[in-house]
Amino acid sequence: MQIEDIPCLRCGTCCTWYQPLITDEESERIAKYLGITVEDFWEEYADTRWPIQGKHLIKHIDDHCALMKTEGYQHLCSVHSVKPDDCRAWQESLEKKECQTGLLKVWNLKIENGEVVGTEEDLDKFIKYLAEIT
Ligand code: SF4
């Protein structure tokens, strides 16, 4: 299996390692999507430990972005269609350490010489999962 054929695995690693820093405009966009006021959005989702003029960090709950939700093997953004610009700009790739970490953590698979490798059983499960999400 060649790594360039593989889409975002929805492993949640990038939403676990990073906190998006969002502008007031992005806060308003997400608050509107959630049907709450921007003040309520900041109250519930902003990490107030690092105040930055005109920007807010999204806080983490249980070691992951407060906006991430988990469904089975999949870790999804609950505001996907209006998610922060930084998250939108993120490009998944099994050449990145984040995606390789998720591949190992969730599927027990590694990348070697540009290919996904692991036991036959783990590879079978992974191929079935890919068929579900593509
Ligand atoms: S806003 Fe969405 S995509 Fe961005 S880190 Fe949080 S859960 Fe992940």
Image: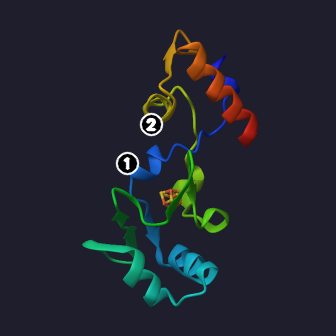
Decide: is 123 above or below 47: above
Decide: is 100 above or below 83: above
For mark 1, does the 10 Å Cα neighbourhood hold few (<14), some (14 to 19), or many (20 or more) residues? Answer: few
Residue at 70% of width from left, 26% of height from top? 5
Residue at 41% of width from left, 75% of height from top? 45
Tell me whether circle 1 and circle 2 mark residues in contact (CB < 8 Å): yes
Decide: is 20 above or below 3: below
Looking at this view, name the residue that lies furthest to the top.
113
Find residue 114 and report its image quarter: top right
* Percent coordinates x, y for residue 59 in the rendering: 36, 67
Query: Is 119 on the left-hand or right-hand side of 80?
Result: left
Question: SS class of the residue under badge 2?
Answer: helix
Looking at mark 1, is its residue's CB closer than 8 Å to ligand 1? Answer: no
| Marked residue nearer the N-terminal end (1 or 2) | 1
Residue 130 visible? The answer is: yes
Q: Which mark is residue 98?
A: 2
Question: Which residue is under mark 1?
Answer: 17
Residue at 46% of width from left, 46% of height from top? 14
- Amino acid under disc 2: Glu
Looking at mark 2, is its residue's CB closer than 8 Å to ligand 1? Answer: no
CA distance for labels 1 and 2: 8 Å
Find residue 13 and report its image quarter: top left
